[in-house]
Image (cartoon, grey):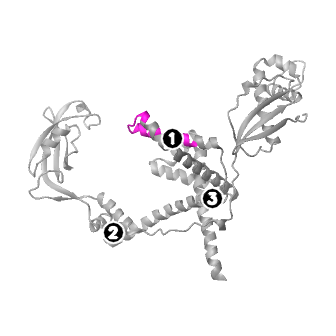
């Protein structure tokens, strides 16, 4: 196979990591690329009078028709643009080629071709010596405020109901009721010991009628409400019909949060003190995870500060625009008008640009750290991620694996795992060097 003929190329900088590449393809190279394209398209064809792969381009052109011309054009631009990047020293630096319209350049076999295209290149990320990173550790022990908040949240989920003698249902008191449904004299589903309060109407009943009937009730009172049996009701043949609910108030109760002793009992613990110790341990673990995330963020910030670098501006703008679009869609889903969403996005445009630049810089630093420190995603990492997702979603692990493969999401998952591993590696390596700096003076 003849040696590929050279081309000429020049680059001009348009902005940070943004170049225009001007290419001149000599006529002989154009013909060579066309010949390559024709022969590649005809590979395996049996052409009378010629050995396989030895039919001249003129014959192939006649046999393959106009379609081969377009294929040859694509072949030409693909090969020569790659060569041009090598000529100007950017072959391994290109992040992406920007919009390129090949149709604006007429191409003729045997004639010189000149064209231009633009590329964005990878930012030049330089990692500092780890000794240069100074990120202080913060305590992860549970604070009194965190413990109290955890106790209150737990107590709210273990509500107690104290009977109120001679009490009546009002804003502070609930009714403990027994309930039975009826339709045309036929008795239906029933329930006992339900607790209802004002403002939380019985399923299928009119809200105002419900509040009016329940307000002021005391133990022993009875009343009935008209109810509509809606989709999902247990007796399917009643759905869409109107019946009644007969309600008997057994007692009036006042809800309260469980005490620490009651919580310990509910959780099969020996004492309130054991409950607190367990909560402190869990809080400390959560604090530790948040602290590692904070440290990773601060380390990334420090790396960007010590060795600043620039990003392609268009990339930053696209990232900010994607965030703005997502925010607008979320606002409109929550009831905002399109105009309101647009106004809100405009208010935060500068901040979104700043945040987008920070996110992208951190991503490129993580990429560099992963390459330099040889952080890899193993099959064990993937299996663990699948198991975690399966547990969170209540699904079988095999189903999760199948879903990710069928939806082509495995590479995305790998990327998420890799980013998480690199962040953890950053924290560990900086902590290691911090410890070495602390121990060294003691040894001396």
Above or below, 442 against 68 in this view is below
**As rendered, which of 294 and 51 lies closer to the eye?**
294
Q: Is residue 358 left or right of residue 334?
A: right
Q: Which residue is mark 1?
A: 324
Label drawn at residue 398: none
Q: Secondary structure under badge 1?
A: helix
Q: Which residue is mark 2?
A: 269
**Residue drawn at (20%, 50%), measured in percent from left and top?**
195
Q: Which residues are magenta?
A: 319-339
Q: Residue at x 87, y 27 (%)?
A: 27
Please tell me in which quadrant of the rendered image residue 368 appears: bottom right
Secondary structure, magenta segment, majority class: helix
| Residue 168 falls left or right of residue 144 | left
Is 196 colored magenta in this rendering? no
Q: Nearer the viewer, mark 2 or mark 1?
A: 1
> Residue 268's spot in the image, x, y percent?
32, 66
Indicate the position of residue 210 as horizontal and vertical percent values: 17, 41
Mark 3 lies on residue:
305
Residue 67 visible (yes or no):
yes
Cα–Cα gap, marks 2 and 1: 49 Å
Q: Residue at x 17, y 44 (%)?
A: 179
The quarter of the displayed image where residue 26 is located: top right
On-image quarter of the C terminus: bottom right
Q: In the drawing, does residue 70 fall left or right of residue 203?
A: right
């Amino acid at each position: 196979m003849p040696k590929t003929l050279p081309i000429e190329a020049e680059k001009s900088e348009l902005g940070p990591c943004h170049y225009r590449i001007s290419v001149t393809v000599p006529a002989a190279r154009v013909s060579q690329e066309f010949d390559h394209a024709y022969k590649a398209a005809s590979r395996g064809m049996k052409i009378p009078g010629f050995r396989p792969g030895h039919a001249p381009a003129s014959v192939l052109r006649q046999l393959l028709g106009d379609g081969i011309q377009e294929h040859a054009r694509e072949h030409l631009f693909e090969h020569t643009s790659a060569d041009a990047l090598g000529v100007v020293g950017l072959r391994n630096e290109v992040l992406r080629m920007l919009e390129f319209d090949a149709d604006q350049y007429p191409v003729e076999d045997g004639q010189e071709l000149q064209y231009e295209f633009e590329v964005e290149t990878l930012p030049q990320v330089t990692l500092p010596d780890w000794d240069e990173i100074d990120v202080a550790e913060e305590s992860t022990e549970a604070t009194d405020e965190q413990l109290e908040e955890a106790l209150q949240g737990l107590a709210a989920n273990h509500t107690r109901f104290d009977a109120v003698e001679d009490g009546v249902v009002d804003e502070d008191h609930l009714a403990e009721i027994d309930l039975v449904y009826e339709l045309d004299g036929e008795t239906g589903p029933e329930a006992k010991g339900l607790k209802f309060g004002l403002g939380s109407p019985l399923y299928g009943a009119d809200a105002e009628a419900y509040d009016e009937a329940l307000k002021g009730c005391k133990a022993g009172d009875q009343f009935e409400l008209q109810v509509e049996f809606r989709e999902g009701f247990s007796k399917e043949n009643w759905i869409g019909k109107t019946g009644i609910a007969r309600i008997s108030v057994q007692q009036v109760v006042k809800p309260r949060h469980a005490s620490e002793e009651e919580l310990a009992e509910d959780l099969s613990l020996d004492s309130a003190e054991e409950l607190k110790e367990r909560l402190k341990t869990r809080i400390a673990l959560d604090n530790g995870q948040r602290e590692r995330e904070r440290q990773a963020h601060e380390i990334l910030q420090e790396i960007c500060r010590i060795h600043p670098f620039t990003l392609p501006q268009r990339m930053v703008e696209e990232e900010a625009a994607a965030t703005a679009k997502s925010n607008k869609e979320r606002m409109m889903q929550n009831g905002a008008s399109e105009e309101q969403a647009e106004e809100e996005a405009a208010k935060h445009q500068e901040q979104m640009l700043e945040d987008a630049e920070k996110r992208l810089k951190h991503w490129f630093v993580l990429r560099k750290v992963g390459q330099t420190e040889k952080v890899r995603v193993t099959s064990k990492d993937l299996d663990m991620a699948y198991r975690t997702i399966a547990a969170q979603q209540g699904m079988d692990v095999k189903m999760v694996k199948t879903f990710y493969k069928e939806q082509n999401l495995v590479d995305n998952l790998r990327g998420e795992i890799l980013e998480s591993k690199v962040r953890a590696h950053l924290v560990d390596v900086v902590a290691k060097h911090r410890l070495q700096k602390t121990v060294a003076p003691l040894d001396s």
